Amino acid sequence: MNSPAKAPRVQPPEVRREQLISATMKSIARNGLSGTTMAEVTKEAGLSLGIANLHFKSKEKLLIETLTHMTGEYHDGQQEILEGGRYPTVAEKIEALLQFDFSSRVATRDKIAVWFAFWGEAKSRPTYQRICRDIDIRAEKSLSNLFQKAIDEAGYKHASAATLANGYTALSNGLWLNLLLSPKQSKRKQARQVARDYLASALPEHISAVEPTK
């Protein structure tokens, strides 16, 4: 009988990079930025320190790539909803965005822990600050454009898309923080309902305060 084939030890560079970034996120969620070391990451990934140094050279470069990966992942998910063809109406886009922001793709406790770890260091790390600022600007611009379309469709004369987007962003950040700090009291479904109530009060013609049935 032939023995099962073993997985090849040599992997494409992009696979190794993804493994190391994933391991870095797990380490940050568990140990914070300061407690994350190249040795800890490689142990988590099941790879050698030499492979990690080959792809990222230093812990700082690995952290920057991890943050860049996370911001890119969020931006791509948001743009898939707003610019893709899956959700043709403004109302459908708003509902899909709300589901996305409080889904397992975005709002797991580990991912939120990583976001807040980087945000906490952004003030003293110009590179982190720039990356975080860029994603915030892009996200709020996308939200403002979406909410402006909803306002125009409904004919609201005194509504501000920018204010609505700013409020939704601040509320989402606060709800994510609650999910991180009080996991027993705060759940994604509850957080999503709070955000839903906010949007439904501002855009009642485009989103209901009642969670749609699947």
Image (cartoon, helix red, strand yellow):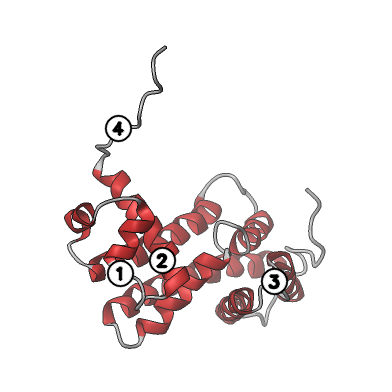
What is the x, y in percent for residue 150?
65, 66
- The CA distance from mark 4 to mark 1 is 27 Å
Residue 155 in sight from this viewpoint: no
Q: Nearer the viewer, mark 2 or mark 3?
A: 2
Q: Which residue is mark 3?
A: 191
At a point 63% along the width and 64% down the height, the residue shown is 102
**SS of the residue at dot 3?**
helix
What is the x, y in percent for residue 99?
65, 59
Q: Residues within 10 Å of mark 1 (few under 14, many from 20)?
A: some
- The CA distance from mark 3 to mark 4 is 43 Å
Residue 121 in sight from this viewpoint: yes
Q: Are marks 1 and 2 in contact (CB under 8 Å)?
A: yes
**Residue type, numbered disc 4:** Pro
**Residue type, numbered disc 3:** Ala
User: In front here: 75 or 176?
Assistant: 176
- The CA distance from mark 1 to mark 3 is 33 Å
Q: Nearer the viewer, mark 3 or mark 4?
A: 4
Question: Where is residue 152, by image quadrant?
Answer: bottom right
Q: Which residue is mark 1?
A: 37
**SS of the residue at dot 1?**
loop
Q: Residues within 10 Å of mark 3 (few under 14, many from 20)?
A: many
Q: Which residue is mark 2?
A: 27
- The CA distance from mark 4 to mark 2 is 25 Å
Q: Which mark is residue 171?
A: none
Question: Where is residue 106, by image quadrant?
Answer: bottom right
**Residue type, numbered disc 2:** Ser
Q: Which residue is mark 4?
A: 8
Sequence-first tag of 4 and 1: 4
